[in-house]
Structure formats: structure tokens, C-alpha cells
Amino acid sequence: MNLQEHARLRDQFPALAQQVNGHPLVYLDNAATTHKPHAVLAATDGFYRADNANVHRAAHALSGRATLAFEAARETLARFINAPHQREIIWTRGATEAINLVAQSWGMSELKAGDEIILSTLEHHANIVPWQLIAQRTGAIIKVIPLDERGDLDMAAYRALLNPRTRLVSVAHVSNALGTVNPVAELVAAAKTVGALTLIDGAQAVAHLPVDVQAIDCDFYVFSGHKLYGPTGIGVLWGKTELLTRMPPWQAGGEMIDRVSFAGTSFNALPFKFEAGTPHIAGAIGLAAAVDFLLAQDRGAIANAEAALMARLVTGLKQIPGLRLIGEPMQRSGAVSFLLEDIHPQDAATLLDMQGIALRVGHHCAMPLMESLGISGTMRASLACYNNQDDVDALLTALHKLSDFF
């Protein structure tokens, strides 16, 4: 992707044109949430302006148009991750709700005392706490894959944890804190040798890597829309049909039923069994617009540009006196964490914000990871398709100044 092409892509994101604290915005907090292109803004605005109606069952034109757009969005997301059937796409509020759905539905109905759940040290709290709650209620046991010195999963330790009691392996595709890309297909294949199911948290992967759930061969894959240039409050749970069919509903109400009487209730077919109440219709339509926008780009060129930008960032960070990278995994995507000697991360981030540079500080909802590293938190810079060399160089220049001053 040449500079002119990238500039045209960047121009699609209106929020990036603003100034913050008197400086051009340098937005490097994309692992938390991404900005939205014109196509997404137009899709959500267009729904509310012209087609606003509830979906399914209604006999009027607006509802018919809303339903067609809503279900077309489901089909778009199925194609995006190469799901075999669009009925396997369950709309959720995000990756967090998707994991909770699996935990509450599959976990509560299938797990028993002594069963084992394998997580990793890298996990976001959203892929830890739901399983802790289920373990407390069922008597299941949580085991944790450790990291090696680089920040990669210790695969030998993982294989040693697997045994006939292992019922589920639930791991991130990409770490939100270190940017570590996990070998998910290898993790899944190993889990299958002991008959365990697998859930992959793809929240940090879908905007950067091509995702093919059939090639990975996992049982569940989850992600959020707002990290994929889409709206907040919308996400996807993908699961294999046979599993979703066996799982009981999690939430109850309208839409997820077939027939209700006071004598009993029968439930709707997939995917509606798991979509109680009025869904986030505009969110689903906006997420489909985000996917269409991304697929209209040269994803290979974007991936190469992001990799080159990450290499420039990491190389530059290593040249700053007193700066320590946190983790140097074999494959990194999206995010890099670091600390500056003698400067509290919050203070450094505040000084960077005064120069229009937005990044994130703290434990990044990965407190067990931070504890394993012997630190309380980090500064994190995270990239998206619209970032450029000027963004990276602005951060590096500002960090050099902070290092020199302190």
C-alpha cells in the first residue's frame, strides 16, 4: 500500500482529523476500541433515519427492510470468518457476553466436579472470571498455561496439562496486553487428542488477521464489533451447530421462543434461541458495514503495512534510554507494552495526552498476567489500519523527550 492509498484509507475515519489539546490526534489505543469509517456511520445513521423498526414477524414495510438488513448482516459475518452456516452466528453485546453465554449455557449444563478448564496466563479478565464463577458452582478446576521468557505460551507445559479430565480449553487468539499471537490451530488440535472443546477469544485478532473458523477447527469463536471498526455493544459468538443445538438457552424472553403457555415453553431454532429480546439491530448492520469496508481493502497490503509499522515502533522503543519492553513474543500483532524508568505510566500517559497522543495505561484487564510479570501495569500502544509513520514517530519523539527530561 503506497502513501497515497493509505492516506485515502485514513481519510475514511473522520475522528482522526481532529485536534486534541492543540495537537493533531495520534490515536494509538486501538486495542481498546477502534474508530469508525464513514461507511459504518452511514449504515447506522441510515437505519435509524429510514428503516427504524423491530425485526421479524411484523407485516409492514419498515420491519421487512430492517429484517432483511439484519439477517444480511448475519450472513456477512458468517462469510467473514468462513462459518459453515449463518445460523451459527449468534449476536451478542461483545466478546465478553459471548464468553459468558458459553460459560452459563454449556458450562452449567455440562461441567461437573473434577472436570478441568484450561486457560492461559495471557487471558483478558473476560476469559477468566466467567470460568471462575462456573468452576465455583460446578466444582470444575481451572488450570493455567504458563508463559516462557519471551511472552509466548509454554506449549510443552500446555500439553502436560491436557488429560482425560480436560473439558474445555479457552484461550485468546491474540493477547490484548502483549500482542502475542497464539498458535490457535495447534492448541485446538492438541485439545482434540483428549476430547476437549475449545473456545478462541478473537477480540484482538479479527481486525488484523484473516480468521477461518473451519481451518482453526475450534468449537467456539468470539469477538467484538467495536475493535473491528464497528459499533459498540455488538459482537459475535460463533459455535458449531451440533453444540449450539444441544446447549440450553441462557436468557429468556421474546424472540427466543417457539411457543409459550403456562404449562411450559418450547424454544426457537438457531440462532434465535440465544437472542432474547429486541437485538442491537443498528449495531449488527453497522458491524456488517465495517466488515464490508475492511474486505473492500487490500487486506494483504494492510497486514504488511501494519507489520512494518509495528517493526518501526518496536525498533524505536528499544532505542529509548530507560525504556523496557514487556514481552518480545515470536509473533506480535496489534499491541506492544512497555515501561519507562522513574516515570509512573499514568503520569507519562497524561504528558503524552497533552501532546495529542492517545494510548492506554494500567493492567489492561489482565491482572494475572501482570502479576506473573512482577509488575502492576504497563503503557500500551496499539495499531490499526489507519495508523501511519507520523503516528509512530510522534510517539517515539515524545517518549525520547520524557526519557531525557526525567
Image: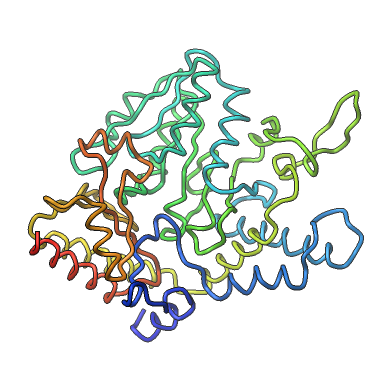
Picture quarter with the N terminus: bottom left
In the rendered view, does 401 fall on the left or right side of 208?
A: left
| Residue 179 position in % (x across, y down) | 32, 51
Q: Residue at x 27, y 76 (%)?
A: 390
In the rendered view, does 380 fall on the left or right side of 229?
A: left
User: Which quadrant of the view contains residue 280?
Assistant: bottom right
**Count of picture labels:** 0
Q: How is the image coloured?
A: rainbow
User: Which quadrant of the view contains residue 149?
Assistant: top left
| Residue 320 position in % (x across, y down) | 11, 61
In the rendered view, does 285 fall on the left or right side of 335?
A: right
Q: Residue at x 42, y 55 (%)?
A: 32
Q: Is residue 139 above or below residue 181?
A: above
Picture quarter with the C terminus: bottom left
Q: Is residue 20 above or below residue 379?
A: below
Q: Residue at x 44, y 28 (%)?
A: 193
Q: Is residue 44 above or below residue 204?
A: below
Q: Nearer the viewer, residue 97 or 49?
A: 49
Q: Nearer the viewer, residue 40 or 23?
A: 23
Q: Residue at x 28, y 68 (%)?
A: 354
| Residue 323 position in % (x across, y down) | 13, 55
Q: Residue furthest bottom?
A: 4
| Residue 183 position in % (x across, y down) | 36, 44
